[in-house]
Amino acid sequence: MLNFDFYNPTRIVFGEGTVAQLAQLVPPAARVLILVGGASAEKTGTLAEVRAALGARSVNVFSGIEPNPSYETLMRAVDQVRGQDIDFLLAVGGGSVIDGAKFVAAAAHYEGDPWNILETGGAKITRALPFGAVLTLPATGSEMNNGSVVTLKATQTKLPFRSVHVFPQFSVLDPTKTYTLPTKQVANGLVDAFVHITEQYLTYPVQALAQDRFAEGLLQTLVEIAPQAIAAPEDYATRSNLMWTASLALNGLIGAGVPQDWATHMIGHELTALYDIDHARTLAIVLPALLDVQRDKKRAKLLQYAQRVWGIDAGSEDERIDAALAATRHFFESLGIPTRLAAYGLGTAAVNAVVGQLGAHGMTRLGEHGDIDLAVSRAILEAAL
Ligand code: NZQ
Ligand code: ZN
């Protein structure tokens, strides 16, 4: 096991009817800015429920945070925070809104150009406004981690940042708030959570026995609940398991003391920035191809994954790995998420464009060994055609 320093201060308030607890969770004298995306928070009644719970507090709302939140939109929220002397943020939505709140919290009093937050991956953040979240889309784990991804639309640059200062103080996870999700967003959530786990698990062994078993259990849970999560939007037990599994997939626990890959995400972010493909769908395209191209570097963990997650233990090593990759691809496709670039109308021109963007963004030494250079990224994208 590698050295690690695990820290996660986010309080999770879980269960049906927990939005009302905002009355206790948000400081009574707070000047609150609620951040939402498009129409869903309003249409589903969640925004009204949040407002009611906040009672007589000073409350303003900023709406319009788009999926894959843009720097340009978020800077308008920063202006509102500064102009209205806001001292507490409350994100109500999915990963885009929560990521947006993290950026606004850090940018509100940032010394210098706020885009520098993305350029430096959050390293220069020294403080941030306190904020909480009400999660309405289980997928990213943003409700319980200190990461965020923001896009500068002007240059199609989508970059991550993280900082110890941008953990949510609390997140309210009420599974009934996911009942209104479109099927495609539920499918996205299952795949995003799945790939968060593989980024922290399908690398190389470091005798992290607990993290491996934990990661394998989360993967098996996602595979087990997926059909019901799609088929029965109001199945409370299934949505509870989806919500909590997605949070545990990226709250730091399974990633403590183990090597991490993240190349699938970095390549996927470029596909989203260039072609506006949903985040999770870019992962479904890249992961199977990346595991195939990197199979020799990942051999031990791929065989363990085949056996422990998919029950595959017959045949040669490569036959077992092939079967595990096929099972992974089939899982994504069974959720209605295509895994080939061609299914999104993309071909060699897109491979060239993504490789160009990876180079422009310094993404030239990706993966747990830092060995995925532009040539390997090209091979991965070509394997995904
Ligand atoms: O915009 P609104 O009206 O809110 O509609 C949203 C949005 O259109 C809708 N929605 C959300 N909750 C709903 C709902 N519709 C009906 N009922 C509800 N209860 O769903 C759409 C997608 O929402 P979004 O927040 O964009 O999706 P997701 O949660 O998948 O977040 C994706 C973003 O998270 C980033 C991605 O890069 C992407 O920008 N990620 C954040 C990570 C992190 N912070 O750790 C890690 C991830 O790997 C990922 O990169
Ligand atoms: Zn993700």
Image (spheres, grey):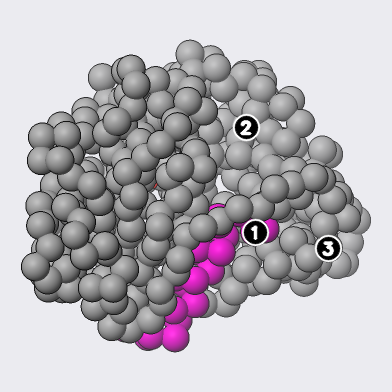
- The image shows residue 312 at horizontal and vertical percentages of 79, 67
Q: CA distance from mark 2 to mark 1?
A: 29 Å
Indicate left or right for 176 with 328 as reference: left
Looking at the image, is mark 3 or mark 2 earlier in the sequence? Answer: 3
* Mark 1 residue crowding within 10 angstroms, few (<14) / some (14–19) / many (20+): some
Furthest residue in direction right, as rendered: 316
**Number of numbered discs:** 3
Q: Which residue is mark 3?
A: 209
Residue at point 40%, 54% (across, down):
168
CB-based contact (under 8 Å), mark 3 and mark 2: no
Q: Residue at x 49, y 71 (%)?
A: 244
Residue that carries the numbered disc 1 in the rendered image: 253
Image coordinates of residue 271 in percent, x first then y, are 43, 33
Which residue is rendered at x = 72% and y = 27% of the image? 370
User: Which residue, given by chain and number where applicable, does mark 2 sit on?
Assistant: 380
* Vertical placement of residue 256 versus 49, above or below: above
Q: Which mark is residue 25?
A: none
- Height in image: 199 above or below 351? below
Q: Residue at (41%, 77%) from the top-left corner?
A: 14
Going by the numbered disc 3, the residue's amino acid type is Leu
First to last magenta residue range: 233-254
Secondary element at image label 1: loop
Expressed as whole percent of the image width and height from the top left, the position of residue 326 reads: 66, 56
